[in-house]
Every structure is written in structure tokens, then in C-alpha cells.
Image (spheres, rainbow, N blue to C red):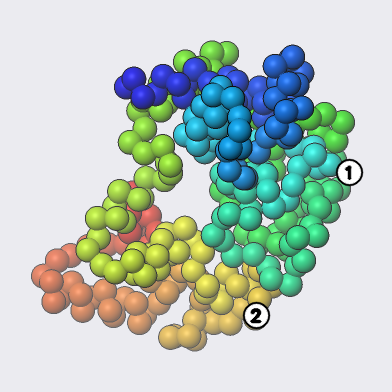
Amino acid sequence: MTGLVPHYKTSCTSLNILNNDHSIWVDILNVKYGKVNFWQGAIPAKCSWFFRGLCHSAKYIKPFCKINAVNPERTSFLWDPWIFDIPVAFKPTYINMDVDLPNVAMSDLVSDNLWDLNSLSLIFGELPNTFNSEFVSVVPDLDNHWIWLPKPSSCKISSAVYHHLNNQSSFSDPWVGWKHLWKIPVAPRIKHFIWLCIKGRLSTFAFLNQLNIGPDRPCIFCGLHRETINHLFNDCSSAQFVWNQIMIKTNCTFKLFGRFPSWAIGS
């Protein structure tokens, strides 16, 4: 528990830096180290013990920090975590490869100070659950505003951070499926395949078509329905035949309840 002390004590400091709070010490850090991006770059070799400790604590805090107000002119499409929990440049996800990503500006994704959902879908296909266009506002005349996502309305940020981290079994990834996935005694590539299925990122015809990569062809096995993850592993007659054979061989009975990803992690 004592290991959490520096993290929750510096949580307010980290959010003040992210929010560009115009206090004297934040201005000093900006002048000395430039604009701080906790997701990019290494800790400077010659920096104060305070700044080094701040960067170290940020590793545990940043997965739970969220932008809820975005200034398109002050936000990087690739290097700021505006849509995922980490920057797009570091996120293993499928993106429309016909888009010139290095030259995408945040202003390209905004129309009349609102998110242009068509432009977002053109790049990402189906928008991830981590992004809510109604929750994340566009503020062209203000700085980006960051919040502590697990308890955004809390007045005592340090207390909220402490209690949240104290109840977390893993600081690095809050996704509940990891504890199930890593216990499966199979090769890493199989775990990666399962992860793609659960996260909805398997390259089915339906998913790739959402990213403007290829046509939306029917299932390769039955040829009757759209090739989605749930169809391939649950609804397809070929999949149901395989599951029935498995139940016969193992003398076990189970139901997928219509949603393969949820069933796979036992939720």
C-alpha cells in the first residue's frame, strides 16, 4: 500500500500539467522541459528529482486520465490519447490504410465545433467504446481539459486516485479479460487471436469493409450472412457443428448466449 503514496500524491500535479494550469511551477516546468507528453519520449537524463518522480508516477496514472474537452489546434491526432487510452500511434488497432495518417489534423475531424462522425468512421470504422462524441466536447478557444475518468466529479482527486489504485489488481490495463486470457495454456499467437476476437478487431470481411478495405462479402463458410466475429464463432452453421462436436467429445454442455466475445471471457 505504501507504494501507492507517491502516485496518488502527484495525481493532482499530473492533471495540472496536462490541463496547462497557469501556475508558476507549471510554467517553469513548461519552460524547462517543453510541453510535457507522458505518453511520448523518455524521462530527460538531466532533470530534477521532482520531475523524474512525476514522470514515473504518470505511468500508473495516465491510463485513467481522459480528455473530455479537445482543442483541435492543440491536439495531435497521433500523439495524444484523445480517442483511446493511449495515443493512436501506439495503439494496436485497425485503421483505414488509404488515409495519410501522419498528415491528418484534428481539425479534419471536426465540423462546426462538433465531431464529424463520418470522418471518424472513415478512419476507424466502428468507433471504439472508449470514445463518446457526446462526452468529449470540442473547445476551439480553450485548452484541452483532462479529468480523472474513474471518478470525474470528485473534488478530491488525490483521494479518488488512491482508492482507485488501491483496488486495482493491475495498473497497466484495467480490462477484466486479461486474467482469463493469460491463464489459457496455449501459444502466444493463439492468445493474440483470441484477444482480437474479444476486442472486436479480427479482420473479418464486415470489419475490414467498415475501414474501406475490401467488399462486405458473405461468410466464407456458409455464404449466407455477413462475416462478423459473432457469426463466425456462434451463428454460422459450420461453427455450430464444431461446437456440437466439441461438446460430444468432451461430454460438456455450454451455451454461447448469442455473443461470442462476452462468453469467451465469462462475462
Left or right: 196 as drawn, with respect to 266: right
- Residue drawn 76% across the image and 42% down it: 75
- Residue drawn 70% across the image and 25% down it: 29
- Residue drawn 74% across the image and 62% down it: 101
What residue is pinned by disc 2? 214
Residue 148 at least partly seen: no
Q: Based on the displayed image, in which of its 4 quarters is residue 113 positioned? A: top right
Residue 53 at least partly seen: yes
Q: Kindly give the residue lying farthest to the left in the view shown.
A: 251
Secondary structure type for disc 1: loop
Secondary structure type for disc 2: loop
Nearer the observer, 170 or 202: 170
What residue is pinned by disc 1? 112
Q: Position of residue 121 (x, y in %)?
A: 70, 59
Q: Position of residue 65 (x, y in %)?
A: 57, 33
How packed mark 2 is, by other alpha carbons closer than 10 Å (few <14, some 14-19, many 20 or more), is: few
Amino acid carrying mark 2 in the image = Gly
